[in-house]
Image: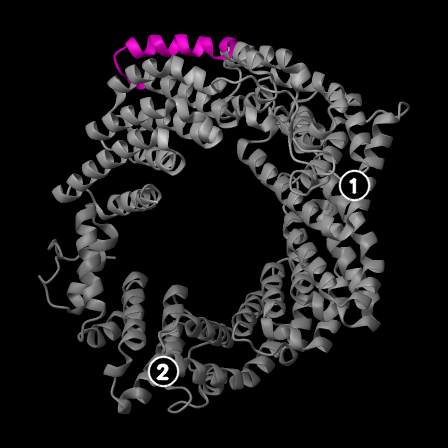
Amino acid sequence: METPGRTVITPDALDFTVENVEKALHQLYYDPNIDNKNLAQKWLMQAQVSPQAWQFCWALLGPDKVPEIQYFGASALHTKISRYWSDIPTDQYESLKSQLFSQIACFSSGSKMVLTRLCVALASLALNTMPEAWPSAVSEMVRVFQEESGGVDGRARCLALLELLTVLPEEFQTSRLPQYRKGQVRGALGKEWGSVCPLLQQLLRRADSPGAVKARVLRCLSSWVLLDVPINESESLVHDCFSALSDPELFDTAVEAIVNAISQPDSQRYTNTLLKMVPQVLALQDQLREAVQTGDMETCHGICRITVTLGENHSRALLEQVEHWQSFLALVNMIMFCTGIPGHYPVNETTSSLTLTFWYTLQDEIMSFESDKQTVYLQVYRPVYFQLVDVLLHKAQFPSDEEYASWSSDEKEQFRIYRVDISDTLMYVYEMLGAELLSNLYDKLGRLLTNTEQPTSWQHTEALLYGFQSIAETIDVNYSDVIPGLIGLIPRININNVQLADTVMFTIGALAEWLADHPVMLSSVLPLVLQALGNPDLSVSSCKYDLPPYATNIVAVSQEVLIKQIHKTSQCMWLMQALGFLLSALPVEDILRNLHSLITPYIQQLEKLADETPNPSNKLAIIHILGLLSNLFTTLDISKQDDDSVDGSAPPVKSTPQPPGPNPVVVVLQQVFALIQKVLSKWLNDSQVVEAVCAIFEKSVKTLLHDFAPMVSQLSGMLGQMYSTIPQASALDLTRQMVHIFASETNHFPPIKALFEHVTSVTLSIFQQGAVDSVWRQSQHTLIQPAATELSS
């Protein structure tokens, strides 16, 4: 593009002339100054919608102009036609149409991007004139481009026509037509399919058609089927698409066309057409296997997309064709092959993940049949789903240690998500297979761990346990008679790998409720739990059940790893919650003794931090310590020692009567109350520290309820002072908890009433000052209103 004058284009500074448009385009593309580019962009947008655009757009399409200028001219035409159609006089429709046909013919051998914009402009004109002013728009397009045109060769005209026919449905999808007009135009386009389909079929079947033409035909079909063209009307064309899959240059576009055709919701009405497609899909199995052997991931992916699309969208329709049950079963088995495609996801293959939703869909359809029909289908498909479980667990296996170490962090994350998807699928499949699935997994694991002659990989063991864990962590398996055997098998596992150890821990954690009800089995898994606690790479999920006989050992190990900060913060919090559950089962004197040894190091550290000048480093340390105490007090509840009778009919009986006296949590809170006040005195203006302090008391109140009573007076006074100094939502939330629990108790009514009145007064004064935004006002109303209701009652 030649450099016009140096004038910088600015909005409203110049008239919308051809010369100025060219200057602005040069400024947009070539000026190094970003501000000048933005000015040019703004000016060009104004020019494009101006009345003068009708004058300059045709001039910009001149053969002496460079493609960037021609493209803007074509875009301006499209903008005027699509957005300002009402400005065009009716008597100019024919002239505009003729000019566009002429320009498309000229550019059929020119710039592809300009040709496309001109085709989009003509498509927009057609949509605005169909069906009244231009009733046979598509037929006329085909006729015009099939006629000889001086200076334009047949191949170029053919490609231009195909481009026009491709963008026409696409322009319809994005057009701004009113809803009633959309319905009219959609109907008119549907009738025009009769002119398009034979043309596409002819071009696709001709032996001398260039590859570029065939690829454009496939794109055109993809575009038209999105108009809900009945699949029976394009059946033979879709059949030709299957033939095109053998051509590597056409493969991707053929896949897209087939998938789009099969995916249309209306296609399920045409059962006979769908039945004809099943053998066509099955015929792709040899091509699929060859692609697997040669590592052609793209071909595997494409064929799998077609297979899954047919099965997923039309499983109901195909299941109901009972006389064709064998062909549909063959299709299901082909999808099974895609699920179990060799290689590790996502490094060696990316296909298997496409299939998982199909298994949900098929199961839903089978289970939705009435009882008699369902029984018949289950006889056929239960074995298929047992095979699916084997395939999924094989795909969930980790690669070798060396290979896994070579994976990038992104690949490892994708594999983790993939395993979660497999876990979800297994959980869903359990609804069909039931207890027999657990027995099946247990038998496989038992044979694996008791076979001394044949060595087994840790990956195989881990995958089977992962299957158990997937089901047990979301579905109640306490009734299952295989759980005792599984607990007995776990000590046989040779844990020599982080991933295996992690899954063992999660499996134990998933069976926590069963273990709590069967303490005699705890001794077999306790060594594994203790070993895991000392390993920074392992989870501590297995520590959340009742282990009172081993409390001293577990607390000692836990204290060591907490002090050494072996675990991440989140795991430390989790571990503290687990210790809270554990300590809750002990006598009060044992709880106090263990609490003293467990938290004393943190209290000493907090005392030191409270004396330091506030800074970001000690802030994090303070929040961490307060978080540990909060999580411990969340679950430390001696009332949980109440034990229901075996049949649940008798009232709860204390297994170990607790002596009267304050709750252990209250004892600790009273001891550290002054220290917490000292911390607040320095950090009261930091919302995160205040929130961490409030969390300790809020979680304690929620857990202890009325046992928190000895702290009410002290805490009410502190909350009032906090809220007066710097009002914060966390303090208000804690106030609500206090009012809710203690306002009805005569002994505690005075401090609670005083606290509520004080908080209300402070809040109202803030409202009157207008110093809060609407969101904060709403949050205060949400918190205060329930508290006021509770207090008044």
Residue 682 in the figure: left or right of residue 444: left
Q: On the image, numbered disc 2 is attached to which residue?
A: 128
The residue at 17%/48% (across/down) is 35
Q: 246 above or below 788?
A: below
Residue 593: give x, y in percent of width and height. Answer: 54, 9
Position in image of residue 109 (x %, y %): 42, 70
Query: What kind of element bears circle 2?
Result: helix
Q: Secondary structure at mark 1?
A: helix
Quarter of the figure with the N terminus: bottom left
Tag 2 or tag 1, which sits nearer the N-term? 2
Give the residue type that dot 2 points to. Asn
Indicate the position of residue 778 as horizontal and vertical percent values: 28, 47
Is residue 404 or residue 760 the one in the foreground? 760
**Tag 1: Cα neighbours inside 10 Å, few (<14), some, or many (≥20)?**
many
**20 is within the stretch colored magenta:** no
- Packing grade of label 2 (10 A; few <14, some 14-19, many >=20) is many
- The residue lying furthest to the front in this view is 746
Q: Is residue 610 above or below residue 311?
A: above
Q: Which residue is mark 1?
A: 438
Residue 474 visible from this viewpoint: yes
Q: Residue lying furthest left in this view?
A: 13
Label 1 or label 2, whichever lies nearer to me, is 1
Amino acid type at circle 1 is: Leu
Foreground residue among 614 and 417: 614
Q: Which mark is residue 7?
A: none
Q: Which residues are magenta?
A: 596-616
